[in-house]
Image: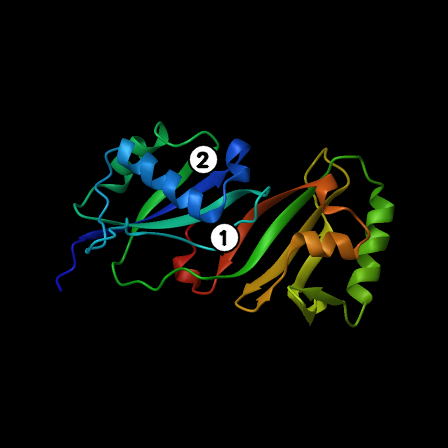
Amino acid sequence: MQANYVQRLRIKFIKDGPTRYIGHLDLAKSLERSLNRARIPLAYTQGYNRRPRLQLTTALPLGYTSECEIADIWLAEAIDPKEALNSMVSKMAPGIQIVNVREVELQAPTPQAQEAVYRITFLEQQDPADLQSRIDRLLEAPKLERERRGKGYDLRPLILGLDLSDVPGVPGQLQMQLSLLPGKTGRPDEVLAEMGFDPLESRIHRSELVLIDPTESGS
């Protein structure tokens, strides 16, 4: 069957504000509606249950915000990426902001994230010395046995980096670099719990995705 798309664009966007509580599937639907409002010529799958040719990278858990989300879209008509960006900017749902749009090869591999960087901001001010002490204890542990969905696993090898954030004027923040490989996904809330914190007493923000193929970084 002949392909009904002629171009593929990669969108990098911010997910913030009210969209922090939108799940992965609802986010895809929201993007589809916004792209239709912007008159972006999306291609659709063929058959009875037609779907937009739109693919999001790694799902972002509910309540998290991000500045590095990635969506690929396939188009029925070619459009200049700059023109697409200008059309999208004012049509996105509240909380979704387009960072950039670029063209990628039609048959390029699906972007797969292998690592993610998160910034943790506590609702109550924390003592940096106490945070550093908790970080040291965690990183020195040979194993961190936990349970997820009824199965035991070791959290420690999933933590690739953990330190105090260096954001000027904002003391007491954490930065985590965690694995996102299939079956080896580190979760910020579980790291916080292991450090003795209630994850609900913090704001978790994804600041960077490291993709498996560096030539398809989405940046």
Q: Is residue 184 left or right of residue 9?
A: right
Type of amino acid under label 2: Ile
Q: For numbered disc 1, what is the local secondary structure? A: loop
| Left or right placement of residue 100 versus residue 164 in this view | left
How packed is label 1: few (under 14 Cα within 10 Å), some, or many (20 or more)?
Answer: few
Q: Which residue lies most toward the top here?
A: 90
Q: Position of residue 154 (x, y in %)?
A: 71, 70
- Whether residue 12 is visible here, answered yes or no, is no
Q: Amino acid at mark 1?
A: Ala
Q: Name the residue located 34 percent from the left edge and 43 percent from the top edge.
A: 101
**Colour pattern:** rainbow
Viewer-proximal residue, 147 or 39?
Answer: 147
Residue 178 falls left or right of residue 145: left
Label drawn at residue 27: none
> Where does label 1 land, which residue?
59
Give me the C-alpha separation between circle 2 and circle 1. Answer: 15 Å
Residue at horizontal 77 percent and vertical 46 percent from the top: 198
**Residue that mark 2 sits on:** 96
Give the quarter of the figure containing the N terminus. bottom left
Q: Is residue 80 visible?
A: yes
